[in-house]
Amino acid sequence: MFNLRTLVTLEALITFATCQDMGILNYQNQNYEAAEKYYNSILSTDSDNPEAHFGKGSSLFMQDDLKNAEIKFNESLASSETLLKSKAFYNLGNISYKNKKLNDALQFYKKALELNPDDDEARYNYEFIKYQKDPEEKKDEEKKDEEKKDEEKKDEEKKDEEKKDEEKKDDEKKDEEKKDEEKKDDEKKDEEKDENSQSQQKPLDEKKSQDLKKAESILDALKNDEKVMQKQQLQRFKTKKLLKDW
């Protein structure tokens, strides 16, 4: 995708080649350590030199020292030269891409294009990453949709379980109420049975009482008859005695 080893750095360095030709020469000859040392020598006496920061950043980048290269490109953004800043943003975009920070890379390429709309490489990289990023975003969205559906499904299942639990509780409550009603009915029937038994027992008791009275009356009558008979016998006995005595 990227022509990362050109980095459009050489074009930027040409803008100040008259004062830093040794750095450019070493860079062109792929002697990046020597180029780095050269820019260090410049920065030792001019620490705010944006071009030297940019040149050192380019040299570090080609040595795969992305962390320090990023620092130097950011320091070069202090330049008042629009073209240099645009190229610094472009290189920061390349670093972000290498670090798999696609959102940051897009923003850096966009800034590079804002400063230099004619930068075809920045435009190409921007569109390429945007195209590459969109499918990833689509996958993320699909993943989120699936996760959302799973959550909704779980919520539905949870609701169904809760509904079943409520229905079960209602059924249990109805069963308890039914049992209570049946118990009350049984108790009522027992009470009615007791009342009926008592009502039936009362006439029986009265009859027994009457029968007992009758029996007592008959017994009394028999006793009275027996007394009368005894008196009559006694009288007869006395009569017989008197007769005998004579």
Image: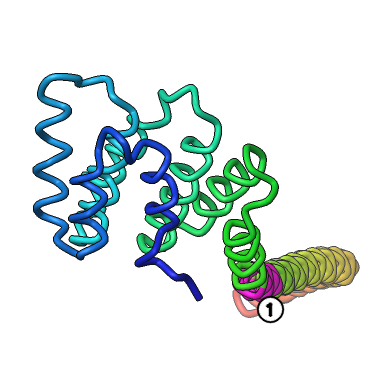
Q: Position of residue 180 (x, y in %)?
A: 75, 65
Q: Residue at x 34, y 28 (%)?
A: 50
Quarter of the view holding residue 216: bottom right
Apparent side of residue 9 relative to residue 242 in the rendered image (left or right)? left
Asked which secondary structure carries label 1, the reply is helix
Please state which amino acid type lies under the numbered disc 1.
Answer: Lys
Q: Residue at x 57, y 50 (%)?
A: 109
The C terminus - image quarter: bottom right
Q: Give the residue number, with chain letter if any, for mark 1.
A: 240
The part of the chain drawn in magenta is 135-150
Q: Position of residue 125 (x, y in %)?
A: 58, 64
Q: Position of residue 48 (x, y in %)?
A: 27, 20
- Front residue of this view, candidates 186 and 226: 186
Q: Residues within 10 Å of mark 1 (few under 14, many from 20)?
A: few
Does residue 148 show up magenta in the picture? yes
| Residue 158 seen by the camera | no
Q: Position of residue 99 (x, y in %)?
A: 36, 60
